[in-house]
Every structure is written in structure tokens, then in C-alpha cells.
Image (cartoon, coloured by chain):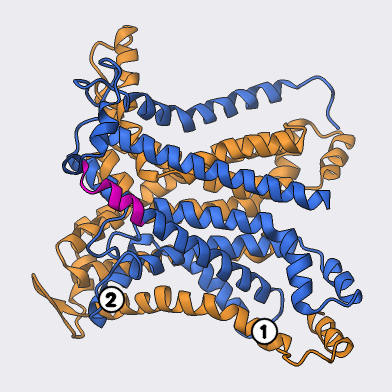
């Protein structure tokens, strides 16, 4: 279709001397993105794959072809526990953000009547996500800490006699901070799909005698599934990649795969970290591929 | 389609939404309040007097490391990333409107760029520079690392924009004798300008706040998020909160400025 249009232009304006064929133009336009992703994404990933087979000591890496790094990683009980722990965080954070994300998006899309108000409320949700993650993370410390707002509130009201210790530096704190950091990645795609639902479908369902609950479960939720899938991709990959939240909010008491990698990197054990990276990457990419089988992202944008 | 009276569902959800907003902003406001902590105050409530002591403390190099320098580097890096993200995403968005060999592969490469864990990209670029014998620096390796994070967002936004963009405007322009460049410059560009500003905002803020990808790629000089990340482990005074307040206020100003610009562009377009 596009080609036909462009040939038409070429014929009606023959006097322009520099003619780039539309085919060539598309390649030229796609070139910068291809080059940048090639150099800073594809090449580094290839590098990691290569390095994961290298030998190393405390100071240097030596080109080699050893499976030692994989054997050490996969043969260790600690690694498996860390993967399980990371998956636990992913499942918990996913379930909570999906719940919050759906209801927030549903409220914005179906209960706010004017577009202007919808946009204002959506921006209210978005703004914090454009500020620093670390700052938003540490902002929980004065709230959750031993002498924090919640604990002093609880103690002063006499509900507990001792401050609750597990609020901060615990798995609870990690999950809470992750939900805080990542919920928008669920709200936005779901809101996007909900806004595209034809309102007459809802009306038709009502006219046919459906209750609000039936409209929700039989019409809206099935149509919102692509948005939920895209949100899931974001949240799951972000949680699987997280090391800072786990480190700061668990106070070093919990572990994640990325944190394990980061510790290996700070000890200059790059090949070991690379082997870990390859395993993590395979896991994350297969999760994403699984989700992409359900939803075609290109159609949902 | 709704009855005029708000349903019970509305009030329940409105309450839920209010709690959610409180959840988003509550802790942030705690930090802002605590950054005005008195000189002898600690990291938690109650406030021990009110002072600007910790903001003044920010400017002393020994207290927090190189705050000014890291802020300048982060801002410069953010601007570089923003400019490249806007330009490259726009070009890629235009390319994806036509069919070309490798389009699907490039699209999935962009998605991959989004889902590959940040720390893996950081490690890969760091090792690649090390093996090539090039010193990593915030303006080279970290710049590339940030682009792998901002470009997918830019490309996805442009994809969404052009999905909704009717080709009839361009056809009309061509029928009136506009060249391909004129059509782009005077018809397409003004219509997508607000979205481009949005892409720019994403590019700047994502880069300005990014630190997992900078971890192995920043070289000798830290960016601001790395500086803050280092502080979380060894700074035990409210100066950390003062820094948090300053960068958050800066982010808010950037966001407000951008939204103002988008509103202005939209108004100018509708006015004609």
C-alpha cells in the first residue's frame, strides 16, 4: 500500500533530482536503531556467552573453553535457593501488581467520566515513576523502620508493646518496595487496553441483562488480557533483574539472582557472573516467549 | 450508559484509588519532610527542630562525595540520551510503517532490549570495553547502556503513535503538491510533536534515574544515581534525604516543564 503511494509521488514530481526509493529509505531509517542495538545489546550478550566459558583467577580472565563456571553455578545448592527466592518475589509481586493495576486501570477507564479527568488522574499515578527508584526505595525506611511512622503509631496506640521488627529489612519490605516501584508498569498497559474496549459492548451486555459482575468477568476481563500480559512481561522481567531493592530493603538478609551476579562482579569473577547471566537470560527470555505466545504486542500498541 | 447516581462500586474503587495514591506519595513526602530535620535530628521521625542544615551539607564535598559533578554528568548524559532517543525512535517509527526485510527481527530485538536484565547489559558492555582495551566512561559505554533502555520505550511509543496515524493527511498533502520532505515537515511532524516530546521526557528521566546499567559502565566518574546508591550503605544522616528531595524536585520540574510544552504544542495545533 505504502509503496504504491510513493511511486505516485515520484511520478507527479519528477523534477526533484535526489530520489531515495522508499525501500531504501526504510532501511536508512531503521539503520541507527539496528546499529545501536547491535553494538550495545547483541555484541555484549555475545561477549557474555563467550566469557562464561573462560577461566579466571583473582585478577584476570583467560580465554578458554571450560564448562566449570556452569558446573559451579548449577551444582551449588545456594544458586538453586537463590533462583527459588527470586521466583518467589516475582510471583508475589506479579500477583499483587496485577490486582492493584487492574482495579486502578478499571476505575480510571470506566468510572471517570471525562477524558481530562482521566488524564489528570493517570498523570498523578505516572509522575512518581519518573523519579529516582533508589530515592523511592529508601523513602520507605523512615516509614517502616524500628522507630518509623508505622511502628511509633502502633506502639503509641497500644496495639503492640514492642516495635514490629519484620516491617523493614525483610522479605515483606522487599515485596512492598517492588510493588511500589513497579505497579505502574501494570497500570499503563491495562489502562491502554481498557480504553480501547468499545463501550457499546458493555452496553449490549447490560441490555442483555448482565449484572455488573457478569459484565466484568465475561466482557471486560477477557478483553483486558493482552494488557495484563504486557504488564506481566514488564513486572516479571523487572523483578527477575532486581538487585538493589533486594539488597537495600532486605538489609542483606535475602538474595536474588541479580544480586548474586553483582557480588560476583564486585569480586571481579566475571566469567562466573557471565555463566549466571546466561542462565538467568535463558530463564527470563523463555518466560517472555511464553507470554508472547498468548499476545501479539505489535497489535496491542 | 451509567445511571446518574454513582454506584456503590464507584465509591469502593475511588477509595481504593485514593489509598493507592497515598501509597505512591506517602513515603516520598516523609523523605521531603525529614530532609528539613534539625541539626541534631536522625533518620526517623520525630523532627528535632527544623533547619536547612542538611541541604547546606550537600554542597560540602566531603559529606556526600562529588554531588555537583555527578549531578552535572547525569544531566548531560540525560540530555544526550534524550536527543538520540527522540531522533532514532522517530526514524525507526517511520521505517516500521513500511515493510522491510528484518523488520520483525528488529522489532523483537527492541523487545529483547527491554526484557534483558539491566545488570546483564551492564556486565556485557563492561566486559566488552575491557576486552577491547577501551576505558569505560559515562559518555561512551554508559551512554550506549542507557540507550538500550530508552530506545525500546521510544520505539514502542512511536509504534503506537503511527498505528493511530491516518495516512489520509499525508495523501492530502501530496495531492496538494507537497514533496515527501514538505509532507513530513509541515504535516506529520506537527501532528506527532507532542508524542516526540513525551519520548524525550522518557529518554531523559529514564537515563537520569538509571543505575543498574551504569554500574559497570560509568568508568571513573559516578553518575548521580550511583552516588546515591553508594550513600545508602554508608551515609547515616538526613543528608541522604536532602539529596533525595533535591533530585525529586528536579525530576518534578522536568516533568512539569515537559507537560507544559506538550499542552502548548497541542493548543497551537488545534488553533491551527
Q: Which chain is orange?
A: A
Query: A153 or A288: nearer the eye?
Result: A153
Magenta segment: does it hold B153?
A: no
Q: Which chain is blue?
A: B
Give the prevailing secondary structure in the magenta stretch: helix
Please give left or right for residue B230 compared with residue A1 in the image.
left
Query: Residue shown at 65%/36% (left/top)?
Result: A120
Residue bearing mark 2? B129
CA–CA distance between discs 2 and 1? Answer: 32 Å
Magenta segment: does it hold B71?
A: yes
Residue bearing mark 1? A25
Q: Position of residue A213 (x, y in %)?
A: 72, 33
Q: Residues within 10 Å of mark 2 (few under 14, many from 20)?
A: some
Residue stretch rendered in magenta on the structure: B64-73
**In the rendered image, the vertical position of residue A147 relative to residue B62, given as above or below:** above
Image mark 2: chain: B
Q: Position of residue B227 (x, y in %)?
A: 27, 49
Query: A252 or B174: nearer the eye?
Result: B174
Query: Residue shown at 83%/29% (left/top)?
Result: B2
Q: Position of residue A250 (x, y in %)?
A: 26, 40
Query: Residue shown at 37%/37% (left/top)?
Result: B246
Q: Position of residue A260 (x, y in %)?
A: 24, 57
Amino acid at each position: 500500500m505504502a509503496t504504491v503511494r510513493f511511486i505516485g509521488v515520484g511520478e507527479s514530481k519528477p523534477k526533484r533530482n535526489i530520489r531515495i526509493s522508499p525501500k531504501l529509505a526504510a532501511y536508512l531509517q531503521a539503520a541507527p536503531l539496528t546499529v545501536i542495538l547491535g553494538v550495545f545489546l547483541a555484541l555484549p550478550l555475545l561477549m557474555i556467552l563467550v566469557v562464561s566459558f573462560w577461566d579466571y583467577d583473582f585478577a584476570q580472565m583467560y580465554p578458554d573453553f571450560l564448562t566449570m563456571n556452569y558446573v559451579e553455578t548449577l551444582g551449588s545448592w545456594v544458586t538453586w535457593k537463590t533462583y527459588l527466592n527470586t521466583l518467589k518475589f516475582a510471583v508475589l509481586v506479579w500477583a499483587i501488581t496485577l490486582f492493584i493495576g487492574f482495579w486502578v486501570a478499571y476505575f480510571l477507564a470506566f468510572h471517570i467520566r471525562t477524558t481530562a479527568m482521566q488524564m489528570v488522574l493517570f498523570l498523578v499515578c505516572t509522575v512518581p515513576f519518573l523519579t529516582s527508584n533508589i530515592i523511592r526505595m529508601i523513602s520507605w525506611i523512615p516509614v517502616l523502620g524500628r522507630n518509623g511512622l508505622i511502628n511509633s503509631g502502633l506502639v503509641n496506640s497500644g496495639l503492640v508493646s514492642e516495635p514490629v521488627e519484620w516491617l523493614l529489612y525483610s522479605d515483606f519490605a522487599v515485596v512492598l518496595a517492588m510493588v511500589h516501584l513497579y505497579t505502574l508498569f501494570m497500570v499503563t498497559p491495562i489502562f491502554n487496553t481498557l480504553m480501547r474496549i468499545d463501550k457499546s459492548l458493555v452496553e449490549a451486555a447490560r441490555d442483555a441483562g448482565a449484572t455488573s459482575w457478569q459484565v466484568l468477568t465475561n466482557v471486560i476481563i477477557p478483553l483486558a488480557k493482552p494488557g495484563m500480559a504486557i504488564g506481566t512481561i514488564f513486572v516479571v522481567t523487572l523483578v527477575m533483574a532486581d538487585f538493589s531493592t533486594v539488597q537495600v530493603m532486605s538489609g542483606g538478609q535475602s538474595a536474588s539472582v541479580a544480586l548474586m551476579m553483582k557480588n560476583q562482579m564486585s569480586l571481579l569473577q566475571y566469567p562466573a557472573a557471565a555463566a549466571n547471566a546466561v542462565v538467568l537470560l535463558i530463564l527470563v527470555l523463555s518466560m517472555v516467549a511464553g507470554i508472547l505466545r498468548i499476545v501479539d504486542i505489535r497489535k496491542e500498541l | 450508559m451509567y445511571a446518574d447516581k454513582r454506584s456503590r462500586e464507584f465509591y469502593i474503587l475511588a477509595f481504593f484509588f485514593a489509598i493507592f495514591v497515598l501509597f505512591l506519595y506517602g513515603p516520598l513526602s516523609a523523605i521531603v519532610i525529614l530532609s528539613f530535620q534539625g541539626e541534631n535530628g536522625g533518620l526517623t521521625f520525630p523532627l528535632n527542630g527544623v533547619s536547612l542544615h542538611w541541604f547546606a551539607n550537600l554542597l560540602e564535598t566531603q559529606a556526600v562525595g562529588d554531588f555537583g559533578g555527578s549531578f552535572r554528568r547525569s544531566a548531560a548524559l540525560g540530555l544526550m540520551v534524550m536527543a538520540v532517543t527522540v531522533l532514532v525512535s522517530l526514524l525507526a517509527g517511520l521505517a516500521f510503517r513500511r515493510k522491510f526485510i528484518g523488520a520483525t527481527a528488529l522489532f523483537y530485538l527492541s523487545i529483547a532490549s527491554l526484557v534483558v536484565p539491566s545488570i546483564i547489559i551492564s556486565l556485557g558492555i563492561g566486559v566488552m570495553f575491557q576486552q577491547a582495551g577501551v576505558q569505560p566512561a559515562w559518555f561512551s559505554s554508559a551512554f550506549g547502556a542507557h540507550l538500550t533502555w530508552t530506545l525500546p520505550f521510544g520505539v514502542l511509543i512511536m509504534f503506537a503513535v503511527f498505528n493511530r496515524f491516518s495516512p489520509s493527511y499525508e495523501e492530502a498533502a501530496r495531492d496538494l503538491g507537497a514533496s515527501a520532505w514538505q509532507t513530513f515537515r509541515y504535516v506529520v511532524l506537527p501532528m506527532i510533536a507532542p508524542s516526540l516530546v513525551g519520548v524525550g521526557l522518557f529518554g531523559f528521566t529514564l537515563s537520569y534515574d538509571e543505575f543498574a546499567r551504569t554500574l559497570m559502565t560509568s568508568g571513573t566518574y559516578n553518575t548521580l544515581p550511583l552516588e546515591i546508591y553508594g550513600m545508602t550503605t554508608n551515609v547515616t544522616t538526613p543528608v541522604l534525604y536532602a539529596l533525595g528531595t533535591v533530585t525529586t524536585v528536579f525530576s518534578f520540574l522536568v516533568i512539569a516543564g515537559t507537560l507544559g510544552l506538550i499542552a502548548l504544542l497541542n493548543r497551537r495545533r488545534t488553533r491551527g
